[in-house]
Image (cartoon, grey):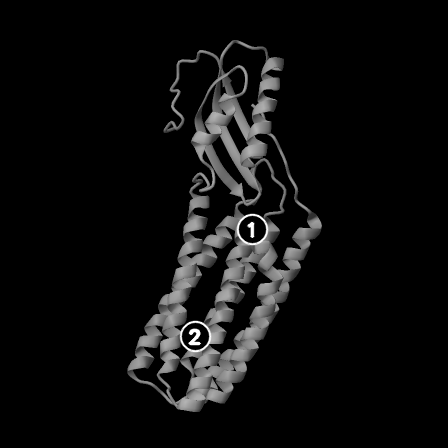
């Protein structure tokens, strides 16, 4: 058995992620407090719904920060992978909270739509502007890391949807101020909720696949088999499992049937070639291979364990 370890974990980059999350947490605590007070004073459900979403942002950012720190903990005899899957779990929790918040907003929007109330639009306008600026800054801080880390992506999506929600609240405030159409507050709340469900479902699906150890969508196992079969003395790659342990660790575990009975040193040479092919063509950087020669077991690509 062999492991190919290709770690590129830069501590400075990880510290920068943590710092950006802390700044985003503080900004969202400020927004939440201001919007709760403003929503109660103005009577705006859209503003209160935006505050609720911002509160969920605070919770999700704290979860993301904790997961980011835990993922750096070293492995031990009891935790052989350490806490590397903490960020996947955090993404799942954050996606779930997006959907729960959205459902609560829909219920309240329907109630308020049946009984619209007059709203202090000036307060709504100014506080929504605060939300746009603060969330916009947070979005910029996390945008780069969101492309390569599912945990940061879940926090980023919370903030992005909240910034868009604040834009919607601002438009609603302007409409209420100049046209006195107060039911727009409930309509915007409903629209915000539907968007949260759309974004939350996509992230929930992605994180669930990772938790269930599904093969990543961008990996075609048949292509992996074809590439390995081109290597000299390889007869058949079978009994394959491919999964993401974390965003930067893609694992493969398989049996490798050989054309002839080779020595350990010869197998090491073959294994090195297999590792290189998997790393270069498929970005698989953790490989565990069980070598075989004429072993009477199933040679199917996928075998139910």
Residue identifier under label 1:
149
Residue 66 against residue 215 in the figure, above or below: below
Question: Residue at image x 66%, y 60%?
Answer: 19
Question: Residue at image x 46%, y 31%?
Answer: 223
Pinpoint residue 55: horizontal percent, then vertical percent.
50, 69
Please state if 79 lies on the left or on the right of 47 as rendered. right
Answer whether residue 225 is visible to the viewer in this image. yes
Q: Quadrant of residue 297?
A: top left
Pinpoint residue 18: horizontal percent, then vertical percent.
64, 57
Residue 217 against residue 233 in the figure, above or below: below
Q: Which quadrant of the figure contains the C terminus?
A: top left
Disc number for residue 49: 2
Question: Residue at image x 56%, y 53%?
Answer: 147
Pinpoint residue 71: horizontal percent, then vertical percent.
59, 47
Q: Quadrant of residue 273?
A: top right
> Callout 2: helix, strand or loop?
helix
Q: Nearer the viewer, residue 196 or 234?
A: 234
């Amino acid at each position: 058995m062999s492991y190919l370890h290709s770690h590129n974990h830069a501590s400075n980059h990880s510290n920068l992620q943590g710092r950006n999350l802390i700044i985003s947490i503080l900004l969202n605590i400020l927004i939440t407090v201001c919007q709760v007070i403003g929503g109660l004073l103005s009577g705006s459900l859209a503003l209160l719904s935006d505050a609720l979403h911002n509160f969920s942002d605070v919770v999700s950012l704290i979860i993301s920060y904790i997961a980011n720190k835990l993922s750096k903990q070293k492995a031990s005899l009891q935790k052989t992978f350490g806490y590397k899957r903490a960020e996947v779990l955090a993404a799942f929790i954050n996606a779930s909270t997006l959907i729960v918040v959205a459902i609560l907003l829909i219920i309240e929007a329907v109630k308020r739509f049946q009984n619209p109330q007059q709203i202090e639009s000036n307060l709504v306008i100014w506080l929504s502007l605060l939300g746009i600026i603060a969330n916009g800054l947070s979005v910029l801080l996390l945008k780069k890391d969101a492309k390569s880390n599912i945990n940061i992506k879940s926090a980023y999506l919370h903030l992005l949807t909240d910034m868009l929600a604040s834009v919607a609240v601002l438009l609603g405030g302007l409409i209420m101020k100049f046209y006195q159409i107060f039911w727009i507050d409930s309509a915007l709340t409903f629209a915000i909720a539907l968007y949260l469900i759309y974004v939350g479902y996509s992230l929930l699906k992605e994180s669930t696949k990772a938790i269930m150890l599904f093969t990543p969508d961008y990996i075609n196992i048949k292509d992996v088999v074809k590439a390995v079969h081109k290597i000299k003395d390889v007869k058949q790659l079978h009994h394959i499992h491919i999964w993401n342990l974390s965003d930067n660790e893609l694992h493969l575990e398989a049996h490798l049937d050989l054309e002839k009975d080779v020595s350990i040193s010869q197998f090491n040479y073959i294994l090195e070639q297999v590792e290189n092919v998997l790393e270069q063509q498929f970005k698989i950087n953790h490989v565990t291979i069980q070598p075989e020669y004429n072993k009477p077991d199933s040679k199917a690509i996928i075998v139910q364990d």
